[in-house]
Amino acid sequence: MKTNYLLPNKYKTIGWILFIIGIVSGILFYASEYESEVLIVNVLSVYNGEPLFGESKSFFQIIENSIVDELITLAIIIGGLIVGFTKEKIEDEFIYKLRKDSLVWALIFNYAVLIFATIFIYDFAYFDVLVFNMFTPLVFFVFRFNFLKYKSQSHEE
Amino acid sequence: MKNSIKVQRAIHDMTQADLANHIGVSRQSINAIEKNKYVPSTVLALKIAKLFKKSVEDIFYLESNE
């Protein structure tokens, strides 16, 4: 099966490591209520300020920021992308179909959850929804694809 | 669509993994095809038939309601 968007199989391990580290540290970070005082560095902020709290907007400023959350976000997204879009050891039409179906279901599932959350979750709790929603499509996609792949491998009689 | 791959495998004394290796697909594919969960492409069907030295119709056939 020819595809032009898949990375070679050898990157899969790196992807899994990044993805798992990202998710575990993400959960820990969430449990600590997004507090972090480490890794504070100067970063370039293209867009800054929260009109919601009466701060004025600013563009292209150097600000101080703890980059822990940024690193976690990048680890989950990059790790997830690598895991989802590297070739299997044997890449064929059935695997290809599994991957495509999983993508479709991940998108449907994601927006179904988002619709539900939009109707029933309000105010600042909705911020949590937005944070989780950054990752749910990828996580669900990776989970479903690997689960089905594992399941259809099972025993012959 | 149904198929007789399992029977053919038994005749040729092949495991799912053997068959998968011979035609260059994953074992998952053979498993899914045998369980009628996946309809293979024409290319793959032709390869399987060629390996068993049968015609495609001998191995893959429609069900009565199709």
Image (cartoon, coloured by chain):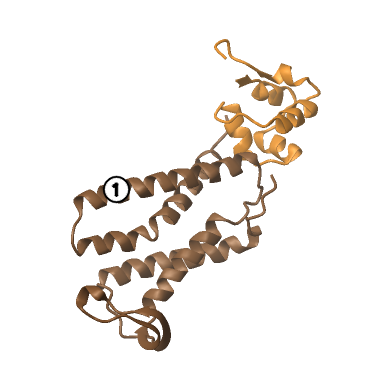
Nearer-the-camera pick, A133 or A49: A49
Label 1 residue SS: helix
Q: In which quarter of the image is residue A62?
A: bottom left
Q: Residue A137: x and y, percent?
A: 42, 53
Q: Residue at x 56, y 27 (%)?
A: B35
Q: Hey, which residue is sitting farthest top in the picture?
A: B64
Would you call the spot at circle 1 few (<14 residues within 10 Å), some (14-19), or many (20 or more)? few
Judged left or right of residue A57, residue A94 is right
Give the chain letter at badge 1.
A
Q: Residue at x 41, y 69 (%)?
A: A73
Q: Residue B42: x and y, percent?
A: 71, 29
Q: Residue at x 38, y 61 (%)?
A: A134
**Colour for chain A in the figure:** brown
B5 up-or-down from A128: above or below: above
Query: Which residue was labeled with disc 1?
Result: A115
Judged left or right of residue A64, residue A12 is right
Which quadrant of the figure contains the C terminus of chain A?
Answer: top right
Q: Residue A10: x and y, percent?
A: 64, 62
**Callout count:** 1
**Three-letter residue code for mark 1:** Ile
Q: Residue A37: x and y, percent?
A: 30, 85
A28 up-or-down from A40: above or below: above
A50 up-or-down from B49: above or below: below
Nearer-the-camera pick, A40 or B9: A40
Q: Quadrant of residue A8?
A: bottom right
Q: Which residue is drawn at 54% across and 64% down?
A: A15
Q: The orange chain is which one?
A: B
